């Protein structure tokens, strides 16, 4: 009986220890914004465990997760930092273009 309990505890620890707590996973939509006074169309992004989809473009990615930021690095080695504003809002700084905000869709 003790062996069964020990194995069960080990299995639960393994399963929860290996689960990734990635706050970006899911679908996001940019908030409306203007660039040089011109309204920009909203953009959807979907993050899965190993990929990121923007429009029809899909790229394999890796995530580096810290307390208030997730760095998403694609196959080319280029990384983009997403700041975690709250569980349903993120931001991304684009050099020369400013900051974009995204709301969680699901």
Image: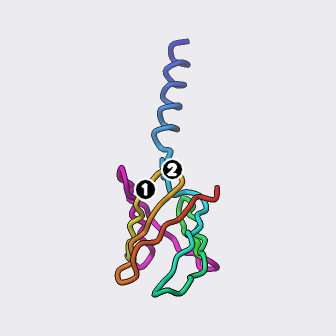
The residue drawn where x is 35% and y is 84% is 96
In the picture, measured across the screen, residue 73 lies left or right of residue 48, that is left
At which x and y percent is residue 33? 52, 76
Secondary structure under the numbered disc 2 in the rendered image: loop
At which x and y percent is residue 2? 51, 13
Q: Quadrant of residue 30?
A: bottom right
Quadrant in which the N terminus appears = top right
The residue drawn where x is 44% and y is 65% is 91
Pointer 1 with pointer 2, Cβ within 8 A: yes
The residue drawn where x is 57% and y is 73% is 32
Mark 2, residue position: 87
Residue sitting at the far front: 37
Q: How is the image coloured?
A: rainbow
Mark 1, residue position: 84
The label number, if any, that marks residue 93 in the structure image: none
Q: Quadrant of residue 105?
A: bottom right
Is residue 44 or residue 3 the one in the foreground? 44
Is residue 40 or residue 50 the one in the foreground? 40
Q: Quadrant of residue 17?
A: top left
Mark 2 packing: few (<14 Cα in 10 Å), some, or many (20+)? few
Q: Is residue 75 magenta?
A: yes
Q: Is residue 41 magenta?
A: no
Read off the magenta span: 55-77
Is residue 33 or residue 45 the one in the foreground? 33
Quadrant in which the C terminus appears = bottom right
């Amino acid at each position: 009986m003790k062996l069964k309990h020990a194995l069960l505890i080990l299995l639960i620890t393994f399963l929860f220890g290996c689960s990734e707590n990635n706050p970006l996973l899911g679908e996001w939509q940019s908030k409306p914004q203007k660039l040089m006074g011109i309204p920009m169309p909203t953009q959807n992004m979907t993050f899965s465990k190993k990929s990121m989809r923007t429009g029809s473009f899909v790229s394999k990615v890796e995530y580096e997760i810290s307390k208030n930021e997730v760095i998403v690095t694609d196959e080319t080695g280029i990384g983009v930092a997403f700041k975690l504003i709250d569980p349903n809002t993120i931001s991304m700084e684009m050099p020369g273009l400013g900051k974009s905000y995204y709301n969680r869709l699901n």
